[in-house]
Amino acid sequence: MSASALRLQIGARTIAEVPRRLRRVALSLDQALGAELPELPPLDSAEHGYLLTSLPDALSPSWPGIAFVRQRYIRYFVDLRAGEAAWLAGLSGNARATMKRKEKKLAAANGGTLDVRRYRTPAELAECHPLARAVSETTYQERLLGSGLPADPAHGQALAAEDGVRAWLLFLRDVPIAYLWCGADGNTLRYDHVGHDPVHGALSPGSVLMAVALADLFGDRFRRFDFTEGEGQHKRAFASGGIRCRDLLLLRPTLANRAVVAAVSGFDTTMRLAARAARTPALARIARRLRRA
């Protein structure tokens, strides 16, 4: 898969794009945990290089051109084989208490019960898709990141026919307000598409739905739940393990690519310094406004 640009972002907001055609090579969780160096497919003449995602810190591919680390993060996951009791025991006491409090609050808003509905067969997913799409259209994941649930009503049908999809919807008074749509990669289930209606953000529907979905998965066939690339507070809160990874650019050694790396590196450094500065109380409010603008 090729990407047409490098994004320069503040939080979830893209403020500029640098045109580059990159061949994206994404490591699966199994590859990352197994420290398997991926095979790089040949570049075509119009491609400027590769973007390797979730490359473990322990691996360094041999490359005659420019190598540049775009970001570092922990790729979080849940070891489902350990069982639900072990997972809960691994959470902090505060995390368990917060999870119960949020579930009770949302249940109270719904008349006393949580209304979570599960979908896995092609017929069930055909019913789920338009409801999940209605939620996805309200989310920042779709508006700012372009990572909402695909609009194609047949999305996931072929994989579902092979028992490779799990989806959940959370309803509030019979209206869907949060969704989670996950595809399988062998015995691993991926955190593919997720979101909640921001109108109901005070009820923490995304966190509640995630907790319910994970509880379901301990009785399912999967070995791991993969939170995929990037970090987030909710991933850290629910995960039972993680591996340190980086996204690595491998570019042809041209003057244009060297200029691009210098520009992107300068931007990334500025953002890291700004993030540190924004932790001070005087600047935190300004930073939040900028990210949400």
Image (spheres, rainbow, N blue to C red):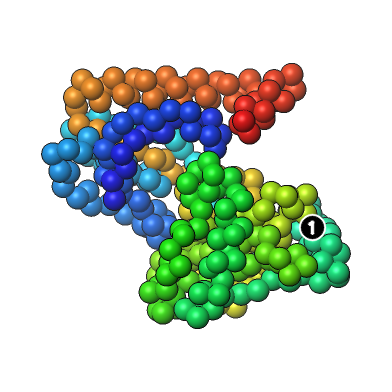
Please indicate whether residue 215 sits to the left or right of residue 40 in the image.
right
User: How far from the left and from the top, in percent, is residue 286?
Assistant: 68, 23
* Of the pair 104 and 35, the residue shown nearer to us: 104
Please indicate whether residue 205 sits to the left or right of residue 273 in the image.
right
User: How far from the left and from the top, in percent, is residue 192?
Assistant: 49, 58
In the rendered image, which quarter contains the C terminus? top right
* Of the pair 207 and 139, the residue shown nearer to us: 139
User: How far from the left and from the top, in percent, is residue 187?
Assistant: 44, 71
Q: Residue at x 40, y 47 (%)?
A: 54
Q: Residue at x 67, y 30 (%)?
A: 288
Which residue is situated farthest in the left direction here?
45
107 shown above or below 37: below
User: How far from the left and from the top, in percent, is residue 266?
Assistant: 42, 19
Please indicate whether residue 34 sits to the left or right of residue 197 in the image.
left
Name the amino acid, label 1: Lys
Label 1 crowd bin: few (<14), some (14–19), many (20+), radius 10 Å: some
Q: Residue at x 69, y 20 (%)?
A: 283
Give the quarter of the image for residue 196: bottom right
45 shown above or below 162: above
78 shown above or below 284: below
Query: Pointer 1: what residue?
Result: 102
Q: Residue at x 55, y 20 (%)?
A: 273
Q: Secondary structure at mark 1?
A: helix
Residue 60 seen anywhere in this rendered image of the structure = no
Please indicate whether residue 124 sits to the left or right of residue 186 in the image.
right
Residue 47 seen anywhere in this rendered image of the structure = yes
Q: How many marks?
A: 1
Give the quarter of the image for residue 178: bottom right
